[in-house]
Image: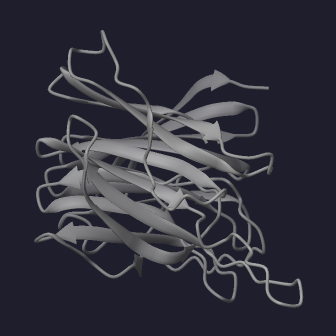
Amino acid sequence: DYPMISTLHGQNFLAHFLQKSSEGAYSYDIKMTVSNDSGQAWNAPFVLHDDGKEAEHGFVSVTPYKDNFLVVWLDGRNTVIAEAHDGHGQGGAMTLRAAILNTNGEKLNEWELDNSVCDCCQTAVSVTSSGPVVVYRNRSEEEIRDMYVVRFVDEVWTDPKPVHNDNWNIAGCPVNGPRISANGNHVVVAWFTAPDEPKVNVVFSKDGGETFTNPVRLDNGSAIGRVDAVMLGEEKAFVTWMEGENIEGALVSNSGDILKRYVIANSS
């Protein structure tokens, strides 16, 4: 759960970092700060979310969107256990939220995108010709934690739906989020999953994330995950991941062909 920075036209910047809100292990806030002079001066940091709860907030993704910034994050406001009259309570689920901020950091709009998601997998967002697309690890009541997608179409967020039904049943967060990249309406999504064995999958979309191809497995059998992906034009993408003691990469076509493999570096 790390800081991120985004720029609009190279002049307006939006950055975030995390700050503890209490002594609780997972109680921290998302602090935002903006610069409108190419990063020379920054305004006083402010809290992104306005719930006021000492809970987990983080795993932020941020991207320029039109003349503003779109911010997506995991929000634990519903996970705080409320004390009942007998001294016991029940915490709710982690949620996925999004907001649009202008270049001064003012919040123009905010939404809850999903009311129950995986607790600490990084989110990812990219803007297509049809609008923003967010991918994230969902969480069902049966503890199925697969990749889901929501899209912002005609100023309305779509209902969450699976990128692919891996049916990974795991009673805990793997802390291993997806990545998305778009070029026009051509989209790539890569992610880690382990319903039977650990693997790294990649899919493509030609309609702005409305539909996706069947997954292509990229790893060699000992995947750790930690993926990244970028579209190179409209017909291929470059995907990286960790496997064994290596950081590996592959050039993949949107038809599912692995065009070239790379061992980028070693890692202990």
Pick the residue in front: 233 or 85.
85
Pick the residue in front: 124 or 92.
92
Pick the residue in front: 109 or 137.
109
Quarter of the image containing the N terminus?
A: top right
The reply to whether residue 159 is in sight is yes
Vertical arrangement, residue 4 with respect to residue 124, above or below: above
The reply to whether residue 255 is in sight is no
Vertical arrangement, residue 209 with respect to residue 8, above or below: below
The type of colouring in the image is: one colour
The residue positioned 64% from the left and 56% from the top of the image is 56
Residue most toward the front?
Answer: 85
Quarter of the image containing the C terminus?
A: top right
Where residue 157 appears, as percent x and y from the top left, is 26, 74
Pick the residue in front: 14 or 256.
14
Where residue 121 appears, as percent x and y from the top left, is 60, 56
Vertical arrangement, residue 146 with respect to residue 71, above or below: below
- Residue 27 relative to residue 130: left or right: right
The residue positioned 35% from the left and 50% from the top of the image is 71
The part of the image, by quadrant, that contains residue 194 is bottom right
